[in-house]
């Protein structure tokens, strides 16, 4: 077991890093990575306010538990707020906001906020998707994060009521066009089970049609549970592995001995 998308009390997670390490040991993880939300000055609700304290604490744990588990210190960088990359072992690049007239609207934190994003585009979901994916792909090409975070997170609330995206052929066309562009970066795509743990989605991101494209392009993938508490650490990984194997994937990547290496799923 491996997981590199984990949030703690240093950002919007519920458990301390040490509680998470102990839970990971109990679940026989070989290697884990913390990915606190990078500092976003325009919205302080979700991000780390004490990045130095975070770095110090994760390094302390890395040393304390070095004979039992590998621990890495990463960050989930928001596309609007670049971090100092040198401070971290790896970065997950994610796109969490629409920005209009200097106001930032969170995409994925809850359904009410998401509806405000829809409002910004007068419920034109294809225009919203075009804006989201084109901006995200520009960020990916420029920044080349180690891991691309929840690529199609705009579909997070799609299974709650009327499907706006997944049943919409025009939406799928846009998403498929841009997943091809993102794949050219050669970054690792995360297969994120976070919204399944929250009972919002029945399949991970990216959705199945995008995973088929990634498989065809021989893209690298990494399993992540985007955990905000210890209960969801590694959530749904066994099912996700079977699902990925059905699509044709044989390998996923993990950070082991300071390198992203592939292992059989
Ligand atoms: Zn995120
Ligand atoms: Zn996250």
Image: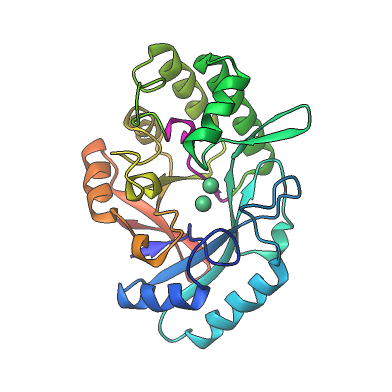
Please report the residue visible at 29 percent of the width from the left and 43 percent of the height from the top. 249
Residue pictured at 51% horizontal, 73% vertical: 16
- Camera-side residue of 72 and 51: 51
Res 37 quadrant in image: bottom right
**Image quarter hosting the C terminus:** bottom left
Residue 232 point in image, percent of width and height: 36, 60
User: Which one is in front, 128 or 110?
Assistant: 110
Residue 37 is covered by the magenta coloring: no
Q: Is residue 78 above or below residue 48?
A: above
Q: Looking at the figure, which quarter contains the N terminus? A: bottom left
Residue 118 is situated, as x and y percent measured from the top left of the image, at 55, 22
Q: Nearer the viewer, residue 256 or 31?
A: 31
Say whether residue 265 is visible: no
Task: Tell me: 204 left or right of 144.
Answer: left
Residue 50's spot in the image, x, y percent?
70, 67
Left/right placement of residue 85 relative to residue 91 reads right
Instruction: Say which residue appears at 66% left-offset and 60% top-offset.
Output: 48
Instruction: Please say if 75 is above or below 20.
Output: above
- Residue 106 quadrant: top right
- Where are the magenta residues, as a range? 146-156
Tell me the residue at 33%/38% (across/down). Answer: 201
Among all residues in the image, which is located at the extreme right? 102
């Amino acid at each position: 077991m491996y997981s590199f998308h984990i949030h703690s009390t240093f950002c919007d997670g519920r458990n301390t890093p040490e509680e998470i390490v102990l839970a990971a040991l109990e679940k026989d993880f070989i290697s884990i990575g913390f990915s606190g939300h990078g500092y976003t000055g325009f919205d302080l609700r979700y991000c780390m306010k004490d990045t130095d304290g975070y770095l110090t604490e994760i390094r302390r744990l890395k040393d304390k538990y070095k004979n039992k588990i590998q621990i890495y210190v990463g960050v989930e960088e928001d596309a609007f707020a670049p971090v100092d990359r040198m401070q971290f072992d790896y970065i997950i690049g994610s796109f969490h906001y629409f920005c209009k007239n200097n106001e930032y609207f969170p995409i994925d934190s809850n359904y009410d906020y998401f509806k405000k994003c829809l409002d910004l585009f007068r419920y034109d979901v294809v225009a919203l998707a075009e804006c989201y994916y084109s901006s995200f792909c520009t960020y990916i090409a420029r920044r080349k994060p180690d891991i691309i975070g929840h690529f199609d997170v705009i579909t997070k609330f799609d299974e709650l009521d009327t499907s706006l995206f997944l049943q919409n052929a025009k939406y799928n066309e846009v998403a498929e066009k841009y997943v091809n562009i993102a794949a050219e970066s050669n970054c690792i795509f995360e297969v994120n089970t976070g919204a399944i743990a929250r009972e919002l989605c029945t399949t991970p991101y990216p959705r199945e049609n995008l995973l088929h494209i990634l498989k065809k392009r021989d893209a690298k993938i990494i399993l992540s549970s985007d955990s905000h508490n210890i209960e969801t650490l590694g959530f749904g990984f066994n099912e996700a592995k079977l699902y990925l194997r059905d699509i044709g994937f044989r390998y996923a990547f993990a950070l082991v001995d300071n390198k992203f290496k592939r292992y059989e799923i």
